[in-house]
Image (tube, rainbow, N blue to C red):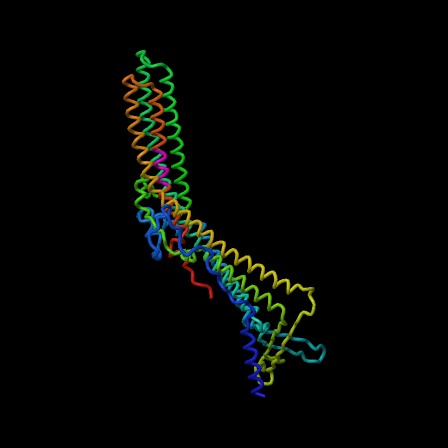
């Protein structure tokens, strides 16, 4: 009899370890093994990209200080971490179904017999397993595994939020520096325009210049003053964005005075690393855990096709006197089990399996799509990085030529050689060239930030909370 019980228990444990979920097999990354090569991509080496943190990419202590504040105070990041905590708690909720639920109850009662009959009391104390489903086909284990993978996916999503926060703050910090430069350009243009208006008015009063020259000079001045107002608005909006990202007030001494302070503070990342590094991107990790969760859901759906066996057990004490409640004769116990199986459900459970399999196929396509999208984003950023230095040199040369042209045109106008229209065109070209150079320099910095973001960047971009068990 003992051997039969042992055999039955061993068989039950073996069945409880059974899982109907298919093994998760990740596909090979659907992208080439290296980034595109060629002049536009500046292939440097095939060495693995070094482990990065935002402090190794964004080297200015001021930007690092702002980033630290943002990571501590940003509300979007707090929401993401709260979602992680909720997902982890849900894992524990689901996992609890794999264990027996124990309960205890106590009762006392008294009844009066009436007349000459003595009254009687009843006392009881009972405890036991109120509900326990034998997980013969892995339904509960797979449900726990699915929720655990969803929790890990939620954690990866929080890393995406953190990574985006760091990159967005760096972009806003760089844009502030660029807008400071654009404000300086507008102010310089306005200063020159005021001097041009003064000289042109003097020439008009002397009968040397027509009124149209004065009006054109006044147009240049008005345009410059309008640009000053626009740039002051842009700077205020830049501060508002940085304040939002940081999650509080911002010390203005932590903001750059110009783009020339920003460019050397954000280092360039090398091209030519293996494209498998994209498997470390938070959005790709999230898609992978989504695929694993969908795979576990298939096991849950398949287990629904089989019978469900639940066990209950009860042990306790009952007595008509409180003093004798724990006497040996007051002890009693009972045990039982229920097995349920659906005979006909019009194919509903099999359709549930089909739904889970289709969702797994969708998750697989989403996982591959996330890798392909990541590859395209990095390749695009590398393409810009491969040509941006030439564009920056061309923009600087254009500004230098426009400055010389404006100086010569102004001298020729004052010498009576050329009309004021030539000087006016030269000033407009100089204004446009200076703004274009700032835009190109900002694009150079933004490309470096984009590479940090698209490569998955910050190696420490995980949540501080422990991994769900």
As for residue 440 lying within the magenta part, the answer is: yes
Instruction: Judge whether 133 appears above or below 240 on screen.
Output: below
Q: Give whichever of 323, 11 is nearer the camera.
A: 11
Q: Position of residue 327 (x, y in %)?
A: 57, 84
Q: Is residue 116 left or right of residue 212?
A: right
Residue 227 sits in quarter: top left
Q: Residue at x 63, y 76 (%)?
A: 337
Residue 110 sits in quarter: bottom right
Q: Position of residue 429 (x, y in %)?
A: 35, 28
Instruction: Judge whether 339 appears above or below 251 on screen.
Output: below
As for residue 168 lying within the magenta part, the answer is: no
Residue that lies at the very extreme toward the top in this rendered image: 207
Instruction: Judge whether 206 appears above or below 167 on screen.
Output: above
* The N terminus, quarter of image: bottom right
Q: Give whichever of 84, 396 is nearer the camera.
A: 396
Residue that lies at the very extreme toward the front in this rendered image: 38
Residue 17 in sight here? yes
Q: Position of residue 141 (x, y in %)?
A: 54, 69
Q: Residue at x 47, y 51 (%)?
A: 373
Q: Is residue 369 left or right of residue 300?
A: left
Q: Residue at x 41, y 51 (%)?
A: 454
Residue that lies at the very extreme toward the right in this rendered image: 115
The magenta segment: 434-442
Instruction: Judge whether 107 appears above or below 291 on screen.
Output: below
Determine the main secondary structure of the stretch shown in magenta: helix
Q: Looking at the image, how many numbered discs can be counted on the residues?
A: 0
Residue 218 sits in quarter: top left
Residue 77 in sight here? no
Residue that lies at the very extreme toward the bottom in this rendered image: 1
Q: Position of residue 129 (x, y in %)?
A: 58, 74
């Amino acid at each position: 009899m003992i051997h039969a019980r042992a055999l039955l228990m061993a068989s039950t444990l073996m069945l409880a370890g059974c899982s109907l979920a298919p093994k998760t097999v990740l596909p090979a990354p659907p992208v080439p093994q290296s980034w595109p090569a060629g002049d536009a991509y500046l292939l440097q080496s095939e060495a693995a990209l070094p482990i990065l943190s935002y402090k190794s990419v964004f080297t200015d202590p001021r930007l690092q200080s702002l980033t630290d504040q943002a990571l501590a105070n940003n509300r979007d990041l707090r929401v993401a971490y709260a979602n992680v905590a909720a997902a982890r708690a849900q894992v524990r909720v689901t996992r609890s179904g794999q264990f027996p639920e124990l309960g205890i109850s106590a009762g006392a009662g008294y009844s009066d017999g009436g007349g000459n009959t003595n009254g009687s009391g009843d006392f009881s104390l009972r405890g036991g397993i109120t509900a326990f489903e034998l997980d013969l086909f892995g339904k509960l284990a797979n449900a726990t595994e699915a929720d655990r993978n969803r929790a890990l996916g939620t954690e990866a999503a929080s890393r995406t939020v953190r990574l985006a926060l760091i990159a967005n703050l760096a972009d806003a910090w760089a844009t502030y520096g660029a807008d400071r430069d654009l404000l300086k350009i507008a102010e310089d243009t306005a200063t020159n325009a005021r001097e041009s208006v003064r000289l042109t008015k003097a020439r008009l009063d002397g009968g040397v210049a027509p009124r149209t020259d004065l009006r054109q000079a006044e147009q240049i001045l008005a345009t410059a003053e309008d640009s000053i107002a626009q740039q002051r608005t842009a700077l205020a909006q830049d501060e508002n964005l940085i304040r939002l990202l940081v999650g509080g007030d911002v010390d203005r001494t932590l903001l750059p005075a110009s783009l020339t302070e920003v460019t050397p503070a954000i280092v360039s990342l090398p091209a030519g690393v293996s494209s498998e590094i994209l498997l470390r991107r938070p959005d790709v990790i999230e898609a992978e855990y989504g695929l694993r969760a969908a795979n576990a859901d298939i096991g849950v759906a398949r287990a629904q096709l089989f019978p469900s066996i639940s066990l209950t057990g009860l042990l306790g004490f009952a007595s008509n006197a409180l003093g004798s409640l724990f006497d040996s004769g007051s002890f009693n116990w009972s045990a039982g089990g229920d097995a349920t199986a659906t005979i006909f459900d019009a194919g509903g459970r099999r359709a549930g399996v089909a739904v889970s399999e289709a969702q797994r196929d969708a998750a697989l396509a989403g996982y591959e799509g996330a890798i392909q999208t990541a590859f395209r984003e990095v390749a695009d950023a590398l393409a810009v990085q491969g040509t941006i230095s030439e564009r920056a040199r061309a923009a600087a040369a254009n500004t230098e030529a426009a400055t010389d042209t404006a100086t010569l045109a102004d001298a020729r106008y004052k010498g009576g050689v050329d009309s004021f229209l030539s000087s006016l065109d030269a000033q407009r070209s100089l204004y446009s060239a200076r703004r274009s150079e700032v835009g190109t320099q900002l694009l150079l910095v933004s490309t470096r930030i984009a590479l940090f973001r698209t490569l998955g960047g910050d190696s420490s971009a995980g949540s501080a909370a422990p991994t769900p068990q």
